[in-house]
Image (cartoon, helix red, strand yellow):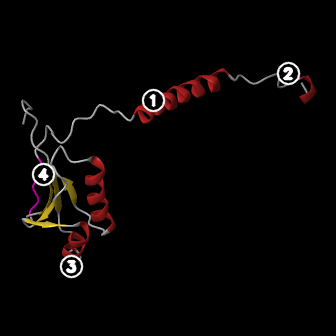
Amino acid sequence: MSLKDTPGFEGLNVIPMIDVMLVLLTIVLTTASFIATGKLPVELPEASAAPRREEDEPMRVEIEADGTIRHGGEVVSLDTLRRRLDPVGRETPIWLRADRKVAFQFAVEVLDLLRTMRFRKLAIETSARRGAAR
């Protein structure tokens, strides 16, 4: 039997590729609907697990409901917070305590400040959800 006698390539089965594309399209459309409405079913800042305790006592940055930032019990601005934390070692754990009524964007700005300063141990302090198992 020679190469001329073997059956040639007659076509490509595209059905598996179409199935994969339909699955990807479904994922994109579902994700796009969450982005378009801006609503994801998230309840913060409660958590079922207690926060992890570090060996070193963490520094706390608190944000009150009206957007007031406190560090060490004193009211500070973002610039003042940056100046206060500049000499602190980057391995120092920092816990952010934000009131649940604080605008999310404001809490993100404080976290962004801490990340741009290259702190490595950041956590958001939460309270235990009522009725959660420990």
Q: Nearer the viewer, mark 2 or mark 1?
A: 1
Q: CA distance from mark 3 to mark 1?
A: 44 Å
Identify the residue position indicated by label 3 in the image. 87
Q: CA distance from mark 3 to mark 4?
A: 25 Å
Q: CA distance from mark 2 to mark 4?
A: 66 Å
Q: Earlier along the polypeptide chain: callout 2 or callout 1?
A: 2
Q: Taking 27 as reference, is 119 left or right?
A: left
Reply above or below: 71 against 22.
below
57 vs 18, nearest the viewer: 57
Q: Earlier along the polypeptide chain: callout 3 or callout 1?
A: 1
Q: Amino acid at mark 2?
A: Pro
Asked if the residues shown at circle 3 and circle 2 are in contact, with their CB atoms under 8 angstroms apart, the answer is no
Q: Nearer the viewer, mark 3 or mark 4?
A: 3
Measuring 59% from the left and 22% from the top, which residue is drawn there? Answer: 19
Identify the residue position indicated by label 4 in the image. 52
Identify the residue position indicated by label 1 in the image. 33
Q: Amino acid at mark 4?
A: Arg
* Local secondary structure at mark 2: loop
Measuring 8% from the left and 63% from the top, which residue is drawn there? Answer: 55
Q: Taking 26 as reference, is 67 left or right?
A: left
Identify the residue position indicated by label 2 in the image. 7
Q: Residue furthest bottom?
A: 87
Q: Quadrant of residue 86?
A: bottom left
